[in-house]
Amino acid sequence: MRRLFTNEDGLTRAALRWGERSGQWRRADIRVWAEGPDDLTQIDRARAAVMATGGVASHHLAGVLHGLDSVTLSGPWVTVDRSSNGHRPGVSRRDLPPERIVTVAGLNCTDGLQTLLDLSPHLSDAVWEHAMESALRRRLTSVERLQEETRVRVQRVLAVRPAGAAPTESLLETLMVQLARTVPGLPDPVRQLWIEAAHARLDLAWPALGLFVELDGQQHKDQPVYDARRETAVVAATGWLCGRFTWTEVTRTPHSTARRLAALAEQSRRRPLLAS
């Protein structure tokens, strides 16, 4: 991430002006500069606003800094004390409890729980669930802590989450869990189910149906070969039916993908394996 610095880093005004003229850095905000001659990005400006105000990265900026799925810099960036003067876009004024503040990328930042709560009025249920699952995956908060909150969106999203379910392992898994809910009669999948006989962990599975799903995101070298071997081992060990789905299928053609998943579920129900 691009280094930002302030005029408190020991440089004189003349040195700061010379650095700007020579392209060594760019002014990012009041008394804040960014290293290098490149144009400022939105995240450069957002981080600079935190430094310039002496505030706390929050809302959308905090979500980006924490790496929460599907969160972009499309709303508030920084929280300052209620007593702070002046107005600027992207600023929220309130008093934060000290225990809700952590350090991320060198900035004071709201913790995972506070960030999710701050984002809840600004995101849809589906997108907030993306962010929540990634926060749980990164151990930034817990289901138990979220359950203590009374906000309607938080409770509504938690209400459709199976008790004791593991966090999804990727945004693609979260999207597939959401898509599976649209298939009539299909129960919630078991996440990251370990099959000892195959020494393999499944992305999503329906053990009662004898069905599991493998998800193909962006592949690295040899990943398709490894996935094929794992699928073969699981089928040999369990006799279950496997469905493979790609990022493109889940994100761009969700309706046809849901129909295909429904067909797989129906095929699994009819297999003789279940009656044995």
Image (cartoon, rainbow, N blue to C red):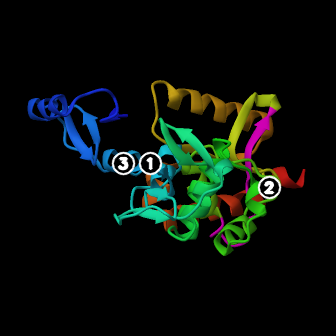
Q: Quote the CA–CA distance across marks 3 and 2.
A: 36 Å
The disc label shown at residue 54, or none:
1
| Number of other residues with Cα within 10 Å of mark 1, as a class: few under 14, some 14 to 19, many 20 or more | some
Helix, strand or loop at disc 2? helix
The residue to which callout 3 is attached is 52
- Asked whether residue 194 is drawn in magenta, I would say yes
| Closer to viewer: mark 1 or mark 2 | 1
Q: In which quarter of the image is residue 78?
A: bottom left
**Callout 1: helix, strand or loop?**
loop
| Contact? badges 3 and 1 (CB < 8 Å) | yes
Quick check: 167 left or right of 17? right
Residue 78 lies, with reference to residue 120, above or below; the image says above
Instruction: Identify residue type, mark 2.
Output: Glu
Q: CB atoms at circles 1 and 2 under 8 Å apart?
A: no
199 relative to 272, above or below: above
Residue extent of the magenta highlight: 181-195
